[in-house]
Amino acid sequence: MFPIAKRKLTLSDISNYWSREISPPASRNELYGLLEGAWWIGEIHGDSAISRLELLKRFYANAPE
């Protein structure tokens, strides 16, 4: 993969770069879904502002009744 000057990349950034580089090709959205799924089950970690548990708590607190 080519050099990237950014110190931090979002899942969206990564999926966008990977979609251009892999063979066979996959869509940006397909790759984003795979990365997001890996984050939810703890296969990948990042410097997130909140934890997976905190995000789930926020989803629950803001869910319509």
Image (cartoon, rainbow, N blue to C red):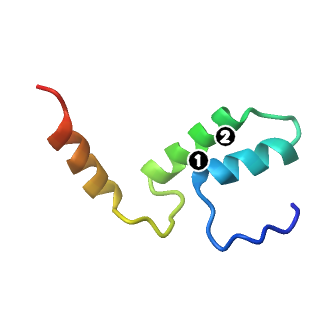
Give residue 62's position: percent from left, percent from top.
19, 39
Please state if 63 lies on the left or on the right of 51 as rendered. Answer: left
Residue shown at the point (67%, 40%) measured from the top left: 31
The quarter of the rendered structure image containing the N terminus is bottom right
Question: Which structural element holds mark 1?
Answer: helix
Residue shown at the point (57%, 38%) measured from the top left: 33
Query: Is there CB contact under 8 Å for labels 2 and 1?
Result: yes
Q: Amino acid at mark 1?
A: Leu
Picture layout, residue 60 above or below residue 41: above
Q: Amino acid at mark 2?
A: Leu
Residue matched to label 1: 35
Residue shown at the point (38%, 66%) measured from the top left: 49
Label number found at residue 31: 2
Taking the view exactly as shown, the residue that stands out farthest to the left is 65
Instruction: Rate crowding at label 1 as few (under 14), some (14 to 19) or many (20 or more) other CA atoms within 10 Å.
Output: some
Residue shown at the point (26%, 57%) measured from the top left: 54
Instruction: Rate crowding at label 2 as few (under 14), some (14 to 19) or many (20 or more) other CA atoms within 10 Å.
Output: many
Task: Write down the quadrant of residue 51 in the picture.
Answer: bottom left
Label number found at residue 13: none
Please state if 4 lies on the left or on the right of 34 as rendered. Answer: right
Picture layout, residue 64 above or below residue 35: above
